[in-house]
Structures are given as structure tokens and as C-alpha cells.
Image: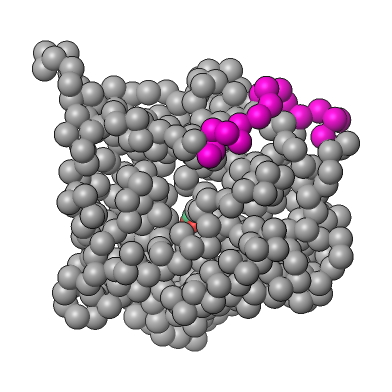
């Protein structure tokens, strides 16, 4: 089996079991974890991959079963079920969450339905995995945390899907920070750059509508980098100063279903973009470290460029999602003549998650983060252990996003965040 979810944590280390052997037919004899998923587009496909693969690679205590997938369009959800390996379909999520043969509900819908589905699933006695950002508003996220805490007392678990914690290189970076390898933190520099909105004729898909998505690049990309920065540092932002912008305010309406991030435009119709296209903000950590963040869909030529660099008194770490099998490390205690950033190829069996995968040098990709996410959640369920990131972690990220919006509305005034 791979490394525990929080490689540096005593709790997580105590959870490490197994030997790293790939799952065989033996997994079929383990108790099932029957999953019902709501949503079947991009994230639904990614999570399906996770559930389908986790038990075949990792030696899991429970056997994830792709029991039912739900979407409003009966034909489309049937096609998705066949493609991704789900045993049955539903067209009403309320029916899905009430089914007796479902143990865990995985929410892969746009943010406007996260709270309603999660509350119903928790009330129905299910464990819940919810895609990021946890909700569209702080109030919704607070209600979800309350429900998760009540359900937790009954033994149910709730996790939010910040999958970039599960890249082996980011998990290794977390471990190295916790080991003190960069020493006292001074700077955190994070960008998440995409370019799928550069064309002003790209249609107004759901991600550009506040009532569905909550916010734009901020919630979609900014949520990831806030979570990752806080996860890697082990600290929570104390306050932010922000700018946001919507560069293109009207766009053609979509003429049909979304195709990945985009869609075909319907000719002659336009609608208003009601979210930010980009968010740039600075922040302070309680330790005194300074942070800068940039999230945009207008970084021409940048496809999925999530980059983070941490500078500490003793060293630095840098990660680039477009080279996700690598971690750069500079040991500032080395003699100057030989010092410099070196590339750690994060494919060794003693790197997080990697003892179950391929021989050294045979790298992993984006989809594997979802396999690791499923793996970690299965362990948490089997061990009755609160998974991370929890709904409370998701709420705290939501509070940062709200502070960014508040600061941007007030010309970047420094806006504290309740810890
Ligand atoms: C689109 O910007 C998107 O698919 C995000 O919604 C995901 O969370 C991110 O992982 C990749 O980009």
C-alpha cells in the first residue's frame, strides 16, 4: 500500500497498514464500500477513475464498488455509466441518496447543489465526498460542517476533494516541511494559470455564472492553491489583500452540453459573465510568512500551470503541476560552492503513495490524484478516522475566498480571516 494520507502525521502513520502488494481477486472478499456518484462530466469521469482503480492498485481494507451514478439526462447518464463502469443509474439525486445499497455519496456537480446534496446524504446516513470548492457561500459551507459534525457522531465521514494534496510530490513536500527541511517559513508563492477563456467568443458555460459556480477563477483555481498552500505550510492564512477582474463581460450562450471546460456557442445570443476571470491576492500567515496568489483563466499558453514555491530560512521547495513527478529542493545549509536547486524525481517506493505503483522513473499523472483520494477515503472509512481535508477545512478555504472577494470590493483593503 502507499503512504498514509498525511505522511508526516502520527495519526496518519498509525493508520499505515499492508505491504504494498497490488490488489488481486482477494479484494472481492473484502467488505464492500458501495459508492453512489452524482454528476458524470469532467469531475465525474475523474472520480470514477479513482474509485475504479484504487482497489486494483492499493491493498485496501474495503472494496469500492461503483454502485450507481446519477445525472438528469437518462440517456447521457447511461452512456457515462457504461463508459466508466457504474452498475446502475439514477436521474434524481434524491433517489440515489436514499438507496439502501449506497454507503458513500460522491458529489461531482456544480457548486450550487453541493450543500443540498451533502445535507441530504448525511441525513440519510451516508459518508460524503464533495468536490471542491465545498460550497458557493460561507453560509452553505457552515451548514455542511454542522451536518458533518452531527453525522460524525453517528460514525459517518465527510471529506472535500482537494486532489492536489494527493500528488506524491506535494505530499513529499508536506513531509519535508514538517521535518523542518526548509526551516522557518518566509515566503509562499503560488500561481494557478489556465487559458481556456482567452478567446472572447468562448461560451458562457456554468463556470461563468455566479448562481451556479459561486465565483470564477477564484473558487475554481484559487480554492486549490489556498488549500495547497495551507496544507504544505501547516498554517492558515490570517488575512488577505486582493484584486479581481472580469475581462470579458458578455459571452455567447452555449448551444449544447459542455465539452470539457468549454462548449459550442449558440449563434446570435449572449449573456453576462457574473464571476471573476482572475484573482490576484497577497496574504499573511500567523508565523509572519508572506504569501502571494494568482488564479486566472487568461494566462495565454498556460494550460494547467499550478506552481508553488516555499522559501524558508534553511531551504526552499518548488513544485509545478505540469511536471508533477518532480519536486525541486534547495538545501540552504549546503556550502555555497555546491548549493543549488536539485530535482527530486518523486517515483521512489518510499515516496508517498508510490510503493503500490510502477518501478522508479515510471511516472504518474493527474488522474492518479483521484485514485489516491479514493484510497485515503477508503482507509478513513475502514478505520473510523476523520478524513482530511474535512468539511471544516473546506469551510476555512471558503472563508478565505470570501475575504478575497470582500477585499477586492474595497480596493484591496487588508481583510482578516477568522481562524
Ligand atoms: C477547470 O478550471 C478545472 O477543471 C478545475 O475545475 C479543477 O478543479 C482543476 O483541477 C483543473 O481545472
* Residue 322 covered by magenta stretch: no
Q: Residue at x 64, y 74 (%)?
A: 119
| Residue shown at the point (26%, 62%) measured from the top left | 238
Please tell me whether residue 53 is drawn above or below residue 384 in the rendered image.
Answer: above
Name the foreground residue: 36 vs 74: 36
| 215 lies above or below 222 | below
Indicate the quadrant containing the N terminus: top left, top right, bottom left or bottom right.
top right
Counting from the top left corner in percent of width and height, residue 87 is at: 86, 55
Q: Quadrant of the C terminus?
A: bottom left
**Quadrant housing residue 224:** bottom left
| Closer-to-camera residue (293/178) | 178
Horizontal arrangement in the rendering, residue 183 relative to residue 55 (left or right): left
The span shown in magenta is 11-27
Q: Nearer the viewer, residue 7 or 116?
A: 7
**In x, y percent, where is residue 52?**
74, 44
Give the quadrant of residue 77: bottom right
Q: Residue at x 80, y 54 (%)?
A: 34
Amino acid at each position: 500500500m502507499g503512504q498514509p494520507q498525511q505522511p508526516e502525521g502520527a495519526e496518519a502513520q498509525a493508520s499505515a497498514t499492508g505491504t504494498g502488494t497490488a490488489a488481486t481477486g482477494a479484494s472481492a472478499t473484502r467488505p464492500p464500500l458501495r459508492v453512489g456518484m452524482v454528476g458524470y462530466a469532467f469531475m465525474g469521469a475523474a472520480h470514477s477513475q479513482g474509485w475504479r482503480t484504487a482497489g486494483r492498485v492499493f491493498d485496501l481494507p474495503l472494496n469500492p464498488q461503483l454502485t450507481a451514478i446519477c445525472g438528469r439526462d437518462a440517456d447521457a447518464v447511461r452512456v457515462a455509466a457504461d463508459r466508466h463502469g457504474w452498475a446502475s443509474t439514477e436521474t434524481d439525486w434524491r433517489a440515489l441518496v436514499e438507496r439502501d445499497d449506497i454507503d458513500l455519496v460522491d458529489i461531482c456537480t456544480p457548486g450550487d447543489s453541493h450543500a443540498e446534496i451533502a445535507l441530504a446524504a448525511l441525513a440519510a446516513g451516508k459518508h460524503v465526498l464533495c468536490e471542491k470548492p465545498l460550497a458557493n457561500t460561507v453560509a452553505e459551507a457552515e451548514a455542511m460542517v454542522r451536518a458533518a459534525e452531527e453525522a460524525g457522531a453517528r460514525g459517518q465521514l465527510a471529506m472535500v476533494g482537494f486532489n492536489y494534496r494527493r500528488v506524491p510530490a506535494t505530499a513529499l513536500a508536506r513531509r519535508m516541511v514538517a521535518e523542518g527541511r526548509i526551516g522557518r517559513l518566509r515566503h509562499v508563492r503560488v500561481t494557478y494559470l489556465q487559458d481556456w477563456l482567452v478567446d472572447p467568443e468562448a461560451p458562457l458555460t456554468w463556470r461563468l455564472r455566479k448562481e451556479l459556480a459561486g465565483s470564477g477563477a477564484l473558487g475554481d483555481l484559487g480554492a486549490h492553491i489556498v488549500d495547497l498552500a495551507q496544507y504544505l505550510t501547516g498554517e492558515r492564512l490570517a488575512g488577505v489583500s486582493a484584486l479581481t477582474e472580469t475581462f470579458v463581460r458578455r459571452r455567447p450562450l452555449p448551444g449544447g452540453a459542455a465539452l470539457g471546460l468549454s462548449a459550442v456557442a449558440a449563434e446570435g445570443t449572449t449573456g453576462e459573465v457574473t464571476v471573476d476571470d482572475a484573482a490576484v491576492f497577497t496574504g499573511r500567515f500567523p508565523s509572519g510568512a508572506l504569501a502571494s496568489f494568482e488564479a486566472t483563466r487568461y494566462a495565454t499558453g498556460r494550460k494547467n500551470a499550478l506552481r508553488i514555491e516555499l522559501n524558508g530560512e534553511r531551504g526552499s521547495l518548488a513544485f509545478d503541476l505540469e511536471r508533477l513527478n518532480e519536486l525541486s529542493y534547495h538545501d540552504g545549509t549546503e556550502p555555497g560552492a555546491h548549493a543549488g536547486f536539485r530535482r527530486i524525481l518523486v517515483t521512489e517506493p518510499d515516496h508517498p503513495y508510490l510503493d503500490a505503483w510502477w518501478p522508479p522513473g515510471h511516472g504518474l499523472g493527474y488522474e492518479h490524484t483521484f485514485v489516491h483520494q479514493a484510497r485515503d477515503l477508503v482507509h478513513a472509512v475502514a478505520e473510523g478516522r476523520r478524513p482530511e481535508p474535512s468539511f471544516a477545512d473546506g469551510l476555512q478555504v471558503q472563508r478565505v475566498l470570501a475575504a478575497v472577494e470582500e477585499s477586492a470590493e474595497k480596493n484591496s483593503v487588508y481583510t482578516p480571516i477568522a481562524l
